Image (cartoon, grey):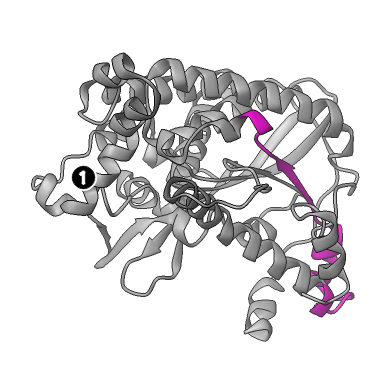
């Protein structure tokens, strides 16, 4: 397994240094982005991207995304290719405004009764109640015509022909093969509205999406998001991962509600944590003089993590597409990106970032991982 993976990745190009910005003449800093999925909490990522797009001289070379992260990635790239950062910002705003409007008309969107009752009952009606309903009946029963308003929205917002021809921003969208349980990554030349619907297909709410004779569910189950394509295909050394869920979860969940929320967060982060651990292991296994070994040594993996106040939102709120909620998440994302840039923008292009072993784990866990005890 390790040998075949090393052979697969050994074709990676060496990381490039900083380049001159064609817009300003200043030094440009090039990054690749990895965007987690997480339903309506993807509006947090929208806010992060909205702020990053305002940063002068910051160039985005490639983006990997799952589910809502994939939609953010593709809409950003489509807008950017049409009219640069401002068009990308406008396209992302249009995406989330349209999601809110679709939700307003849907039975599981903004619920006036939920607003009236408030508290736990209102939360149940907005999210958990729908989750309960989907345990009683499948989307093949609840949605026999397989209607999905996101298809029309994606075809309205995204110029897929342009994206398939594009080489300026490389895109990687993950989906989960229903037959094998393995991830599939769709690159630029394969992108379509079906690919985005597959990447965001929650099996309890939507039918599996058929592509080339195979059926797919949400990419967040297996690659949330995928990092390896960015290592192999991007030239830049800096990969910035935008997270939806926090990593640390203090306290032991004991109620059914707490356990359900914790399981959701663990499953959301598990594919990414596993991939980061694999990258850390490959750093040790790879020949330091090989192209891939040099690529790993030069890799700087950064993380934009949601602030602690994001933990106040239940996992069921990922189904909440009320505009006031989405706008609040956007504002939290912008503020988080602002803080991250103040602290980290000087490190981009310098090879300076947290080690892979300590970037996401508690200190004691990181030490044991570095010593090979885990």
Q: Is residue 293 magenta?
A: yes
Q: Is residue 203 magenta?
A: no
Q: Is residue 326 left or right of residue 14?
A: left
Q: Position of residue 272 (x, y in %)?
A: 61, 57
Q: Position of residue 366 (x, y in %)?
A: 82, 61
Quadrant of the rendering where the N terminus is positioned: bottom right
Q: Which of the pair 163/102 is nearer the observer?
A: 102
Q: Is residue 359 left or right of residue 106?
A: right
Quadrant of the rendering where the C terminus is positioned: bottom right
Q: Position of residue 329 (x, y in %)?
A: 54, 24
SS for dot 1: helix
Residue reaching furthest to the front: 254
Residue drawn where x is 31% and y is 30% of the image: 126
Q: Is residue 31 above or below residue 332?
A: below
Q: Position of residue 311 (x, y in %)?
A: 59, 35
Q: Which of the pair 161/195 is nearer the observer?
A: 195
Pointer 1 local density, CA inside 10 Å: few below 14, some 14–19, many at least 20: few
Q: Looking at the image, can residue 55 be seen?
A: yes
Bounds of the magenta segment: 284-309
Residue drawn where x is 72% and y is 43% of the image: 303
Q: Which of the pair 126/48 is nearer the observer?
A: 126
**Residue named by callout 1:** 133
């Amino acid at each position: 397994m390790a040998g075949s993976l090393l052979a697969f990745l050994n074709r990676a190009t060496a990381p490039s240094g900083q380049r001159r910005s064609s817009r300003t003449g200043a030094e440009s800093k090039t990054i690749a982005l990895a965007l987690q999925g997480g339903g309506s909490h993807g509006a947090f990522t929208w806010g992060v991207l909205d702020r990053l797009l305002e940063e002068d001289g910051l160039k985005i070379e490639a983006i990997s995304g799952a589910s809502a992260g994939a939609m953010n990635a593709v809409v950003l790239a489509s807008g950017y290719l049409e009219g640069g950062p401002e068009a990308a910002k406008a396209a992302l705003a249009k995406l989330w405004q349209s999601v809110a409007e679709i939700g307003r008309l849907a039975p599981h969107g903004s619920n006036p009764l939920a607003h009236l009752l408030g508290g736990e009952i209102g939360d149940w009606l907005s999210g958990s109640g729908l989750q309960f309903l989907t345990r009683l009946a499948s989307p093949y029963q609840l949605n026999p015509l397989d209607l999905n308003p996101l298809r029309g929205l994606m075809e309205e917002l995204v110029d897929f022909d342009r994206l398939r021809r594009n080489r300026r921003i490389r895109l990687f969208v993950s989906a989960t093969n229903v037959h094998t349980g393995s991830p599939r990554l769709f690159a630029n030349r394969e992108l379509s509205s079906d690919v985005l619907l597959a990447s965001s297909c929650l099996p309890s709410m939507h039918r599996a999406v058929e592509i080339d004779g195979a059926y797919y569910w949400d990419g967040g189950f297996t690659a949330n998001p995928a990092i390896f394509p960015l290592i192999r295909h991007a030239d830049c050394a800096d990969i910035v991962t935008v997270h939806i869920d926090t990593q640390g979860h203090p306290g032991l969940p004991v109620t059914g509600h707490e356990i359900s929320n914790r399981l959701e967060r663990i499953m959301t982060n598990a594919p990414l944590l596993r991939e980061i651990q694999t990258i850390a292991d490959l750093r040790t296994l790879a020949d330091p003089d090989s192209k891939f070994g040099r690529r790993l040594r030069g890799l700087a993996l950064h993380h934009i993590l949601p602030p602690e106040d994001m933990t106040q939102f239940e996992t069921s709120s990922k189904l909440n597409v009320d505009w006031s909620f989405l706008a609040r998440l956007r504002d939290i994302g912008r503020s988080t990106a602002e803080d991250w840039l103040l602290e980290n923008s000087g490190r981009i292009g310098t090879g300076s970032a947290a080690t892979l072993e300590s970037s996401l784990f508690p200190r004691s866990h990181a030490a044991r991982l570095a010593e090979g005890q885990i």
